[in-house]
Image (cartoon, coloured by chain):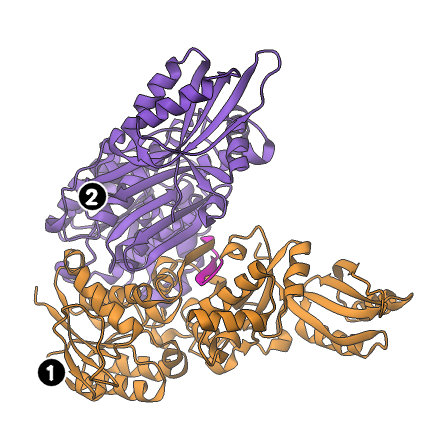
Chain colours: A purple, B orange
Amino acid sequence: MKPVRVGLVGLGTVGTGTVKVLLRNADEISRRAGRQIIPTIAAVKDTSKKRDIGNADLIITADPMEVANHPDIDVIVELMGGTELANQIIMKAIENGKHIVSANKALIAIHGNEIFSAAHSNNVIVAFEAAVAGGIPVIKAIREGLAANRIEWLAGIINGTGNFILTSMESLQSNFGDVLTQAQELGYAEADPTFDVEGIDAAHKLTILASIAFGIPLQFDKVYTEGITQLNYDDIVNADDLGYRIKHLGLAKRTTSGIELRVHPTLIPKQRLIANVNGVMNAIMVHGDAVGSSMYYGPGAGSEPTASSVVADLIDVVRTFTTDHENRVPHLAFQPDRLSDIPILPISEIQCAYYLNMKAANKPGVLADVTRILGDQGISIEAIEQKRTDTDTQLADVIILTNKTKEAFMLDALDQLNQLPSVVDQIKRIRVEYFN
Amino acid sequence: MKPVRVGLVGLGTVGTGTVKVLLRNADEISRRAGRQIIPTIAAVKDTSKKRDIGNADLIITADPMEVANHPDIDVIVELMGGTELANQIIMKAIENGKHIVSANKALIAIHGNEIFSAAHSNNVIVAFEAAVAGGIPVIKAIREGLAANRIEWLAGIINGTGNFILTSMESLQSNFGDVLTQAQELGYAEADPTFDVEGIDAAHKLTILASIAFGIPLQFDKVYTEGITQLNYDDIVNADDLGYRIKHLGLAKRTTSGIELRVHPTLIPKQRLIANVNGVMNAIMVHGDAVGSSMYYGPGAGSEPTASSVVADLIDVVRTFTTDHENRVPHLAFQPDRLSDIPILPISEIQCAYYLNMKAANKPGVLADVTRILGDQGISIEAIEQKRTDTDTQLADVIILTNKTKEAFMLDALDQLNQLPSVVDQIKRIRVEYFN
């Protein structure tokens, strides 16, 4: 079969990884795909920079539109990042009838609906496995492997930097700030870590996962996002004492009233496999009505792991050259005219259990006040523990695990609890999920 | 699009699960596949038996060939088990131009090469996701999701019965025999448990996984297979003391001299995620040169988990109706004319670390003899521990962890060790894998 020529837009970490994998595994790939896949042109910001791409015979250009318009190129691999210029280039390439492979989670989460609509009209494919969880083929698993299921929920550690920081806080017995500095020195966190530690990157990925799991349009602006910057080592110790680990999860759940979409720190029972996913690794649990619970684990970032997904997408795409449109796997797993408008719930309507940590005066009646306020909101207590009374201040740490309740009730209770004269500082509240 | 009509051969646990999932999730499935998939006819052994298939409008026949020959049927779902009759029916259906979905691991492992060859000639697809690890889409992950990689090795807990027994031995502090009886009473083990506990079922699955990972023909007869029947609770305790768990693994590794294909009990460091996969759950680690290590976890058996994979295959198959042949994903992941003849190594040529447990007289010189014999074979010792000297017999348990060596050297050493006058009973030898 005729070789397929690929144009890259961006030749950074993932771009060079993609070229290296295509070259090193050229034989393995052509044995699978039945044809060669040849990187042919790449657009880069700085054409003078030396790049680690072996002896790849690549045309290098500073103009990304040259790639989008190049007549010999069948598929564009977009690895430049950012949303606006990337969107323009992809829309142009689609207009030119070129297929797209992208690792750009922000782009797909924010502009995906328009991009897929244009791709549908122009009879091309936009593949984006590398946009979620790096090398883990979780998009394929949900979209095709679990296609028999009504997906009930999914929950993932989908930001490696955040998981590295949480794991290091535990192993180094340190607070968030100290570990972040170290992660930045090691190159695991960016100079501006906002996207990772505030959960924005995870929210981009969750948007995509939820869409293909439930058959809903991409709705990034409806994801509730809470970062890990407020966590400290005490929280990890308290959780451990109760039999839990804290992970920064992206969660998407189907409920009778709508869909919950939320990214936040979460207590998970230690015996759950996902509670034992450490360092920069990612893992996504997916629960379907037929399969039950399944999990997909692997490296969520990095040059060649991400390239692994980019190249897998390339192989998928070149296989569909002769497929007619209606027989392709739909971009968002469900046929574009069969997406559902199930509402996304506001965070006040979600339901889960809670961990509370309050500093309170160690005197009679305090616990009675606390339990009364929770009881008045219909919130029952799973466990309560008073620990570490400071001999100077006579303040005690009170740790409470509640049963499942609606977030609105918890917020009302927290308002009242924070107003108790015996409660000092803001009460720390972390959500709890059991996955059973 | 025109609905697709499916004929089932076999309507037992997985067959009824498949019909139930197709009916219950009909809307979800047609939203994904763009057409309806309708179970239409089923061949069963006993036509008078009542089955839990809701209000499915199924023609029931006692003649499986009626399904294979039925003119209205596009795809045959083979769920009857066994290898000979199943093979005849599938070959007939292929001859009739029908696509096949099968959950029959023994059939694929033993007759797969001929079946795929016939399918290729007749331009039909044989899909078999459900044949390995039940509901986990691991065939798809390896064949498509990791298609960019040169797969280096894979290792899986791919028999739920065996893993349930090993997990129960640990939690109940019991030996193999007692737990087996209990598993049989609970319905987790067959009356004749040979296929599960001797590793034959796992060897069928490993044959399939190795073939799609490395691009080699199916070679079931070359798999080394060792069961779990010789394990006892002491082994689990000894392993635990050293920081390991024992799992019954299927392993396929690419080495410079050939491919290792082996099923046997294995010590794995406790901190590895796969060491924490318990009960009837399955998990497969796959290591590729680009992605690194990834893992796929979920229920490895059961009615609806297996049906989840059967129906996912059906959706894949109906999507390819209009694909030309050369653009389909090859049955064994690699193009049929590009399979490799890398040799499968005999067990004597494999390399791994070993755990040894010997009962020896607690007197001077014994350990010197033992270490000398190992040293003469070039086997170095990672850890050695003498424990539990029996006050009556003056016999001590000596536990040794070796470094990696060739199995042939270990067998020579074991011959000599077993001949030492101070060593009583046969020495217990379990292989060790680190996965780092």
x, y (%) of residue A399? 48, 28
Q: CA distance from mark 2 to mark 1?
A: 42 Å
Q: In this picture, is B329 found above or below B106?
A: above
Q: Is residue A73 visible?
A: no
Residue type for callout 1: Pro
> What is the chain letter for disc 1?
B
Q: Label 2: state its secondary structure.
A: loop
Q: In this picture, is A217 found above or below B307?
A: above
x, y (%) of residue B328? 26, 68
Q: Which residue is denoted by mark 2 in the rendering?
A: A256
- The crowding category of the residue bearing disc 2, from other C-alpha atoms within 10 Å (few below 14, some 14 to 19, many at least 20), is few
> In terms of depth relative to the viewer, which is nearer, B429 or A410?
A410
Residue type for callout 2: Thr
Q: Is residue B429 visible?
A: yes
> What is the chain letter for disc 2?
A
Q: Label 1: state its secondary structure.
A: loop
Residue found 35% across the figure and 39% down from its top = A250
> In terms of depth relative to the viewer, which is nearer, A180 or B165?
B165
In reply to whether residue A58 is colored magenta, the answer given is no
Which residue range is magenta in the image? Answer: B278-292
Task: Say which quadrant the C terminus of chain B sits in.
Answer: bottom right
In the rendered image, which quarter is residue A390 located in? top right
Q: What kind of secondary structure does the magenta stretch mostly adopt?
A: strand
